[in-house]
Image (cartoon, rainbow, N blue to C red):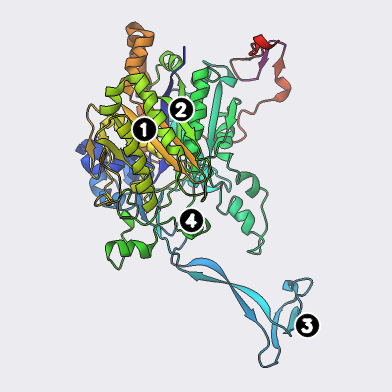
Amino acid sequence: MTRLPVIIGFGGIGAAGRSSFHHAYRRTVLDSLPIAQRHTTLRALAAMMGLVHTQNGQTVTADGSPLAIDAIPRHFEAYVRDHTLIRRLEPQYFDADQMAVQLNFEIGPSNSKPVVFATHTEELPSPLPGGWRVLSQANGVTQIELATATDFRIETHRKIAVQSGGQLPTGFDPTKLYPSRFHPRGLAMTIIAASDAAKSVGIDWDVLTAKVQPDEVAVYASSAMAQLDQHGTGGMLQARLKGGRVSSKQLPLGLNTMPADFVNAYVLGSVGCTGAIAGACASFLYNLRLAVEDIQSGRRRVVVVGNAEAPLVPEVIEGYHAMSALATDEQLCKLDGAGVPDYRRASRPFGENCGFVLGESAQYFVLCDDALALELGADIHAAVPDVFVNADGFKKSISSPGPGNYITLAKAVAAMRALLGEDTVRRQSFIQAHGSSTPQNRVTESRIFDQVARAFDIHDWPVTAVKAFLGHSLAPASADQLVSSLGVFKHELLPGIKTTPEIAADVHRERLNIALRDFDLKGRAEIAFLNSKGFGGNNATGAILSPRVTAAMLTKRHGHAVMADYERRREAVRAKAAEYDEACCQGPMQPIYRFGDALIDETQIEIDSHSLRLPGMPNSISLDLPNRYPDMV
């Protein structure tokens, strides 16, 4: 009997805000929500952005002025709307109009007359460059004569061509919520996101893991670009060029495995399996596939999977701009025939577009097998029966799309047809498109969707693309899709691609319903297909089942009596989770950060031929392993 992987907790942060309890999803459909739900999400965002907090049991604004809870949305709505989702890059990252650059220029003799300049003696290079001659030295100053031309570099500034980004909500700084100790931004986001996911479960982590052996837990997470800001690899590579020095933290904290390592070391204290698969823009689905296969096989019972990426640094933006991949201010103005770019609508999947918009995101999910979820009374948000990954074969351009995505999507649809039947796939599924907002993507991805739809006789297949709101977060891009899909399951409302005014003429759309406005999916939101296309030929498609379909499957497997007992116990779990959500709506998020806490004393580890026991952990690790190859020995 194959165990069913189910999602029992999720959380994270991105341009739409906090992911847990569907707040980030609801920001993308804000105007289509009932007023009470709209106000709840605006209140959650206001707290996240530091606009309000609780003081002595009373809600106050940042300047200490009292404010009634029900007045928060009305008071801050315009500001919250303007300072979330894709927008112009804000100075908290860097000044996009005054980006620091090094200008190379040559200084040399003119009309055979040498150049003479003075500098501090202690700053002289050693040895002196060719053509330099010391004329005099006195009082710490040296006179230098240049007999030949010499290259110099000087710091100057220029305006960057790309000024839009999917930034975290204004005022939210993940490094201020715990003692971050010079952590790269992506890793600070990891701490907040993984904590949000763990707390959203509504079951203390120690209680959850007490039900399993320590090695039946796993964490799979990565970043595609590693940590490229000043506290990570970027700072290490720039240090000498900027006249500084490399720190002891920059190299190790720059590794792309750190989004998993930080969760193990500082959030969960896990000694179970760990891994960090990088598959460019499909990285999340690559890691999710590991989690699904681990749970299905019984190797693991609890798996935390996610990604974190913080690519809004000048060098990364410049790199993607050099590939002609990003929407520049100039191109946006040409699209609209305007003198000022519309930054809010910079990402336009399946419309007339000119490139994608980079975004930052950290998203994590807690999965376990169906039996453990029922035993715990955990709230089940979805099931993940399959994830498919395929490469493109031989390629001419490493960044161009290829045939691998045809395989992944077709197999995902076929797998759901085998599981739930043709009618459910045809009438009750939707697609979360990669939807990168490039002219090439709109043609190639829509062709894949259209051909697969024809093969399975699907008509009016609902399609959306969350990069319209969040930007392209690289490794967590498909995690953003999953967060959105869980919201669709909850509210049965598909976010429309509202930044795209109309579908481009070259999009293959005969069998598709590409939603440009929020789309009612009541009774039709049972299967989500998450589609991801990554540079280098990294293609993946995940199939996600709604809580309603999952409950029906679990009832068939476990019976009505077991499910009724589970539902009774689930109420307490939901209540505790709701307490956490309300706390986040009243003030700053309180992440889990256990630095140097509850360290395992290796001298106290007990081992015999049948088991290994770690101090402080209730369950031992079995060493009575089966022979997996009995027919060969």
Q: The residue under label 3 is which amino acid type?
A: Arg
- The CA span between labels 4 and 3 is 43 Å
Does the image show residue 589? no
Q: Which residue appears at 42% of the width and 61% of the height?
A: 162
Q: Amino acid at mark 2?
A: Val
Mark 4 vs 2: CB contact within 8 A: no
Quadrant position of the C terminus in the picture: top right
Element type at mark 4: helix
Q: Position of residue 626 (x, y in %)?
A: 64, 11
Q: Which residue is mark 2?
A: 366
Of the image marks 1 and 3, the number of the one nearer the N terminus:
3
Marks 1 and 2 close (CB-CB < 8 Å): no
Residue beneath the point at 69% across and 81% down: 149
Judged left or right of residue 507, residue 588 is: right
Residue 608 image-quadrant placement: top right
Q: Residue at x 59, y 54 (%)?
A: 234
Q: Circles 1 and 3: CB distance less than 8 Å?
A: no
Of callouts 4 and 3, which one flags the residue occurring earlier in the amino acid sequence? 3
The amino acid type found where label 4 is placed reads Tyr
Q: CA distance from mark 4 to mark 2?
A: 32 Å
Q: Position of residue 430 (x, y in %)?
A: 30, 33
User: Residue 614 magenta-drawn?
Assistant: yes
Q: Which residue is mark 4?
A: 320
Label 1 sits on a secondary structure element that is: strand
Q: Which residues are magenta?
A: 608-616
Residue named by callout 1: 529
Marks 1/3: CA–CA distance: 69 Å
**Mark 1 or mark 4: whose residue is earlier in sequence:** 4
Judge whether 315 appears above or below 128 on screen: above
Q: Which residue bears the numbered disc 3?
A: 133
